[in-house]
Image (tube, rainbow, N blue to C red):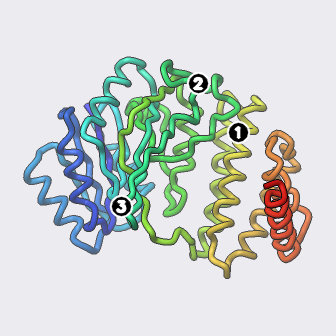
Amino acid sequence: MFSIITPVYNAQKYLDECIKSVLAQSYKNFEFILADDGSNDSSLEIIKKYAILDSRIKYFSKVNEGQGIIRNQSLKQAKGDYVLYLDCDDWLEDDALLKLKEKFKKDDSDIVFFNVYKFFEENKAKIEFRYIDIYSKFKQEPFCVLDIKDILFSANALPYKAYKRNFLVENNIKYSNTRFIEDSEFYFRSMLSASKISCLDEYILNYRIHKNSTTFKQNKRIATIKKTFFICEKILEESKYKDIKEIKASFLKNRIGQLFHYWRIVDKKYKKKYFYMMKKIFKYIKGKYSFEPLKDYFLLNKCKDCCLYPYEIYKFKRLARLFFVSLKSYIEI
């Protein structure tokens, strides 16, 4: 049986489509846990309407605390053999659960990766996104952590994986109790705990991309990003793979990539504070690991520049590098 877990917060615009896609599954043996996280629109009423019509729907409602907490609470209630986390604005393909169930049965894996369709809300465009190409050598046969040690943490995205429930429970794999980047802890612990991982070369889910800006404006999120780095590092250090240099390098590349991702989208008034938070982490990395395992020229230079220069000079140097790289490309054309 599958347990489909969907946190819901003010999702009245998309919730019908999400729920209907689950109820329309060709594989019927599932429970659908809809967890309302204190919505103030009609989301809870929509959930109750469907729960009356189908006994496979379970729901509860609580005060708003964020997706991490509500996903953890939902997992405690889950009874299925397998778990699929489905966001309330996404929806499944009709044979999604059947294909996942067959793959789990065939390989007996802890985690199954799959492909998705990306759906762009603004223009209604739908494109194929082959997520499993990250581990392209293993499209047919399952693999383990040591098989992918150099790219272990290259697949940091929640909507592209399903899990064996006992695997999550026995390894105490949970989301962080934060309202922001709550899935990093879950991701690191699950990847380092898995004995066997599989890739399903099928399009399982429709991942909706909104026009809404991803810029974050809350000052406290900067502290959360810093805290998350050290949480993930601790998970690695407590694992049996802590001394494998390729896994350390994959860890650094993943975390540094995340730091620069949020650097790009942080609100302008917090840019300077965020920069000096990054500088402290990069100096810590340089002292403990060195940057050399990154083997990424552009990432390496950005880290070194951040360590060496104050905010204003760093911005100028990055712009200058971008200009000369663009100029070089233009001349070569």
Find the distance from the CA under tag 1 to the CA under tag 2. 18 Å
User: Which amino acid type is shown beneath numbered disc 2?
Assistant: Lys
Q: Residue under circle 1?
A: 250
- Farthest residue, direction right: 308
Question: Which residue in the protein does label 2 denote?
Answer: 137
Quadrant housing residue 125: bottom left
Which residue is rendered at x = 37% and y = 45% of the image?
A: 85
Q: Residue at x 75, y 76 (%)?
A: 272
User: Which sits in the foreground, 58 or 117?
Assistant: 117
Residues 325 and 60: in front is 325
Front: mark 1 or 3:
3
**Given the image, on which type of amino acid does mark 3 rest?**
Lys
Q: How far apart are the alpha carbons under marks 3 and 2?
A: 33 Å
| SS of the residue under disc 1 | helix
**Camera-nearest label, 1 or 2:** 2
Q: Residue at x 37, y 67 (%)?
A: 64
Query: Where residue 163 sits: x, y (%)?
Result: 41, 34
Which quarter shows the N terminus?
Answer: top left
Disc ID at residue 1 = none
Residue that mark 3 sits on: 124
Secondary structure of residue under mark 2: helix
Residue 44, given in percent of the width and then of the height, sits at 21, 65
* Secondary element at image label 3: loop
Q: Amino acid at mark 1?
A: Ser
The image position of residue 191, as x and y in percent, is 56, 35
